[in-house]
Image (cartoon, rainbow, N blue to C red):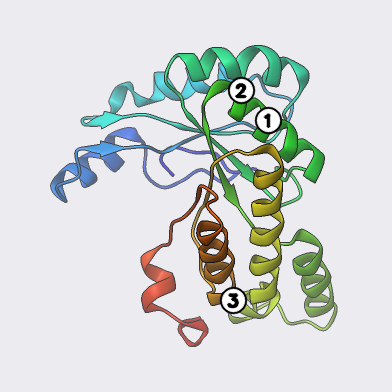
Amino acid sequence: HIEQLSAFGVMTADDFYTGTVSAAYGGTTTVIPFAAQQRGQSLRRVVDDYRQAAKKAVIDHAFHMIVSDPSPAVLDDELPDLIKEGYSSIKVFMTYDKIRLSDEQMLDVLARARAEGAMVVVHAENHGMIHWLVKRLLDKGYAALNYHAVSHVRLAETEAVSRAVQMAAMIDQPLTIFHVSTEGAMAVIRAAQDRGQKIYGETCPQYLFLSADDL
């Protein structure tokens, strides 16, 4: 996440200069941050804007495209051209009101990726389960940071990963699950791999070394 405006209007702390200088000092010579589409935006315009911002970068870089508005123009015109130009991975979200896709929209993206030879990566959490818990916590005044772990129940990840894997199987499209954090999700991924599905998982250091107690 470099020089990325979130769906909530928050800009990341690092721009492409500070972020890539820091990476270079750490020995990293390539970064692949996101080019994040907000609803109503042209995906082509989004990628062009990020490329312009990335002229400040001091190391090699590419982009994962975040698709939050898979309109006919995006699916039929912009994505095929961008994929042919080398932007070969598409991230989708199953939660967060302003960027999440419906199951039908996810199938549309998976089908387009299959046709064009791109990888789909997914933030997989059950939106309804999280929203249901968050509402009840807030109604009772439980808004401190440590309740984040309570609201993001582990089953919400396991269920969404399972659903995403089944959709990928239906389309016969490879899928990468980003930031896997639960044993249940790992079991779903391993079972899919054992069946011969091209399902991959990625995690983050905080899920290996921190726990809810650290909140």
Left or right of residue 213: residue 134: right
Look at 79% across and 45% down and name the residue there.
103
Binning the other alpha carbons within 10 Å of mark 1 as few (below 14), some (14 to 19) or many (20 upward) gives many
Q: Amino acid at mark 2?
A: Ala
State yes or no: discs 1 and 2 in contact (Cβ < 8 Å).
Answer: yes
Front position in the image: 184 or 28? 184
- Residue at which label 2 appears: 115
Q: Amino acid at mark 3?
A: Leu
Q: Amino acid at mark 1?
A: Ala
Measure the C-alpha gap from mark 1 to mark 2: 6 Å
Answer whether residue 140 is visible to the viewer in this image.
yes
Look at 48% across and 14% down and name the residue there.
84
Q: Taking 143 as reference, is 29 above or below it?
A: above
Binning the other alpha carbons within 10 Å of mark 3 as few (below 14), some (14 to 19) or many (20 upward) gives few
Look at 35% across and 26% down and name the residue there.
54
Q: Position of residue 140 (x, y in %)?
A: 82, 83
Q: Disc 2 or 3, which lies upstream in sequence?
A: 2
Q: Disc 3 or 1, which lies upstream in sequence?
A: 1
Front position in the image: 68 or 181? 181
Front position in the image: 80 or 207? 80
Q: Position of residue 142 (x, y in %)?
A: 73, 82
Front position in the image: 11 or 197? 197
Q: Under tag 1, what secondary structure?
A: helix
Q: Position of residue 36 (x, y in %)?
A: 56, 34
Residue 146 occupies which quadrant of the picture? bottom right
- The numbered mark at residue 64 is none
- The numbered mark at residue 145 is 3
